[in-house]
Amino acid sequence: MLKKIFLSFVFALLVSSAFAQDDLLNMLNEDLSKETVYTQATFKASRLINGQTIETLSKKHLNFWISHRFGSVNSGFLSNFFGLDEARIRLGLEYGLTDEWLIGVGRSSEEKTYDFYTKYKLLKQSNLFPFTLSAFGSLALNTMPTGYVMNSGSEMKFFNNKERLTYTTQALIARKFSDKFSFQLMPTFIHINKVENNLFDNNLFSLGMGGRYKISSRVTFSMEYYYNFVDRDTYQLETGVPYPYHNSLSMGFDIDTGGHVFQLHFTNARGMIERHFIALNTGTWENADIFYGFNISRTFSFDRGR
């Protein structure tokens, strides 16, 4: 009799223990689901093609950029070898002050321009928050001699150095939908201190959008497009000629080799900073004003702990 009572007690204890264990596991899973897990590697690099991504650098890391654009493919085989005889180049450095904040500087052969910029990651996508938000700001200094001829055919004269400055502000908003697909919006404001004639507005609003699709562990397809909010019809009505600048569309492939990221692409914009590829882009895909180019990124670490 006592043996039966003892066995019944042990059985009841085991059953109650099993239910208690399930309850503890459920509570643990609920607690884990409340912990913040941040999304990693929304994009492979701090640039998508021409424009910026939401990505910053790790603290005490230095990024060296080489950006290169050949001439237009519609320039022909004999005269220009489909643009390969020409070149525009930008060299750039960017440094991570913190994991969320970088500063950068670059020099472009296009209009012999120096650009200075900063980017800060304000919000991060996680299991509790749907997207990442970074703020970007830059200043570009044109160092061409006064009276030079722009790509649009206009002559540009400067009377002081302040007229040479262009300012850009962007909100970079991105979401990583899966391991393969990420998408980004880039609301953009550009202020040019001196425009080429009075019919141009010093302020330009543009909406950029872009994304990447991961083809393999090392190869990614990327695309970006910037739509400029300008009154093209009024300009043509006033001048009798079409508005000289066009929206930028670029596409290409990223190849990750570990320490390097190679970006190979085609774009109708030859410039490599916001002033050039957003505000002053004269190329169109319809006329085969397409420029083959590449970016090479190499990261160096000055943090011995990483």
Image (spheres, rainbow, N blue to C red):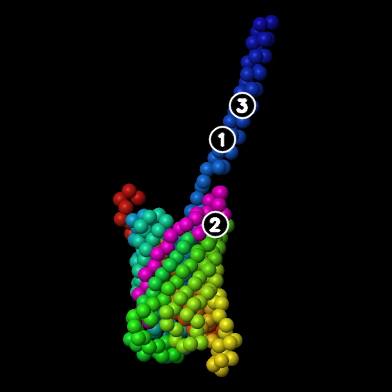
State whether residue 53 appears in this view: yes
| Amino acid type, label 2 | Phe
Question: Farthest residue toward the top?
Answer: 1
**Which percent across, then down, holds residue 113?**
36, 77
- Considering only order in the chain, which callout, 1 or 3, is on the residue closer to the N terminus? 3
Is mark 3 in CB contact (under 8 Å) with mark 1?
Answer: no
**Mark 3 residue crowding within 10 angstroms, few (<14) / some (14–19) / many (20+):** few
- Considering only order in the chain, which callout, 1 or 2, is on the residue closer to the N terminus? 1
- In depth, the one of 157 and 259 nearer the eye is 157
Residue 193, placed above or below residue 299: below
Q: CA distance from mark 3 to mark 2?
A: 38 Å
Bounds of the magenta segment: 111-133
**Mark 2 residue crowding within 10 angstroms, few (<14) / some (14–19) / many (20+):** some
Residue 149, placed above or below residue 136: below
Helix, strand, or loop for circle 3? helix
Mark in the foreground, 2 or 1: 2
| Amino acid type, label 1 | Leu
Q: CA distance from mark 2 to mark 1?
A: 26 Å
Residue 28 numbered tag: 1
**Which percent across, then down, holds residue 241?**
55, 92
Question: Farthest residue toward the bottom?
Answer: 240
**Mark 1 residue crowding within 10 angstroms, few (<14) / some (14–19) / many (20+):** few
Residue occupied by mark 2: 131
User: Looking at the image, which residue is at 41% across and 76% down?
Assistant: 166
User: Looking at the image, which residue is at 58% across and 31% down?
Assistant: 24
**Which percent across, then down, holds residue 47?**
45, 66
Residue 20 numbered tag: 3
